[in-house]
Image (tube, rainbow, N blue to C red):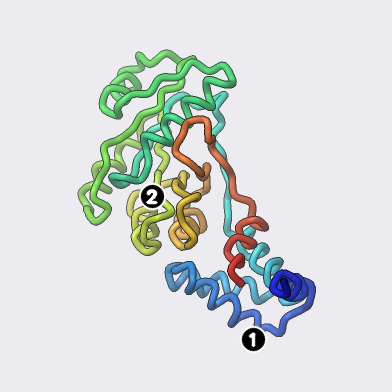
Amino acid sequence: MAQPQARERCNLIAFPRAVLHNLLGETMKRHRLPEGLAQALVREAAIFPDAGVDGALARALSQRLKSKPIDLEKARGILLVGPAGSGKSAVAAKIHHAATLIGRKTELTRADGGLALFRTGTNPPELLTVMEADGFNPLSARAASAFSALGEIEGVETIGVVSALSDAEDVSDIVSAFRFRRVIITNMDRTRRLGAALAACLSSASLAHVTHGARPEDGLDMLEPAALAAQMLLSH
């Protein structure tokens, strides 16, 4: 029973920068963040020692986390691109479910058929088309080159889909190689380590959504810096 009280006291007092640095360094190792990102977060959080551990980490995360949810009322074409097994089909079903709830006419299709309609300008403007690209080997440079051209089609936004269960370094490389502007992170309910999720949404890409659960009705969620910091420090 003493542990929650001790943690509460830790959050309310100011930490010397060295102590805060060490505590957060251990947290980054536990979540297996890429080394460069881990060092940057610790350095940026150490600027706020008076905020306590949770507060300092939350402020560092808020400086880097760029949230940009999908505008389901205005979107016309969404192309989901990600490694095999990342959860693209589940994400497509969630988008379809959410858009239908607000009255949008929505269609799920494979990438080749859906993109052909956009290329020829024959896709109905009132229709939201959610397209799923074939999975790829994340180590393949050719895949990055092939998929990058798809983002140039008018009316279509390419959104990366990555799993929170993946290796954080691999996720960082994928987001960079494919130049994703927005990402959706899946399987947040199935991992205790947040390295992959942070690598995906604290780099060059904005965070569209995260998912908890595979059912369409489980929905598309967002991440708040304070809640994310608390989750990272949960085992302290």
Q: Which residue is mark 1?
A: 18
Q: Is residue 87 left or right of residue 215?
A: left
Residue at label 2? Answer: 179
Amino acid type, residue under disc 2 in the picture:
Arg
Whether residue 214 is visible here, answered yes or no, is yes
Q: Which amino acid, by three-letter code, is at mark 1?
A: Ala
Q: Earlier in the sequence, mark 2 or mark 1?
A: 1
Q: Which image quadrant: the N terminus?
A: bottom right
Q: Quadrant of residue 19?
A: bottom right
Question: Which of the labelled discs sits on residue 34, or is there none?
Answer: none
Q: Horizontal placement of 15 versus 146: left or right? A: right
Q: Residues within 10 Å of mark 1 (few under 14, many from 20)?
A: few
* Cα–Cα gap, marks 2 and 1: 36 Å
- Residue 48 in view (yes/no): no
Q: Give the percent coordinates (x, y) of residue 153.
A: 36, 30
- Does residue 235 lie above or below 98 as drawn? below
Residue drawn at 45 percent across, 17 percent down: 127
- Check disc 2 and report its element: helix, strand or loop: loop
Q: Nearer the viewer, mark 2 or mark 1?
A: 1
Q: Are marks 2 and 1 in contact (CB under 8 Å)?
A: no
Q: Position of residue 59 (x, y in %)?
A: 67, 63
* Residue at the farthest front position: 1
- Image: 50 above or below 172: below
- Residue 202, above or below 39: above
Q: Residue at x 50, y 25 (%)?
A: 97
Q: Position of residue 85 (x, y in %)?
A: 31, 45
Q: Residue at x 50, y 54 (%)?
A: 201
Residue 83 on image: x %, y %: 30, 47
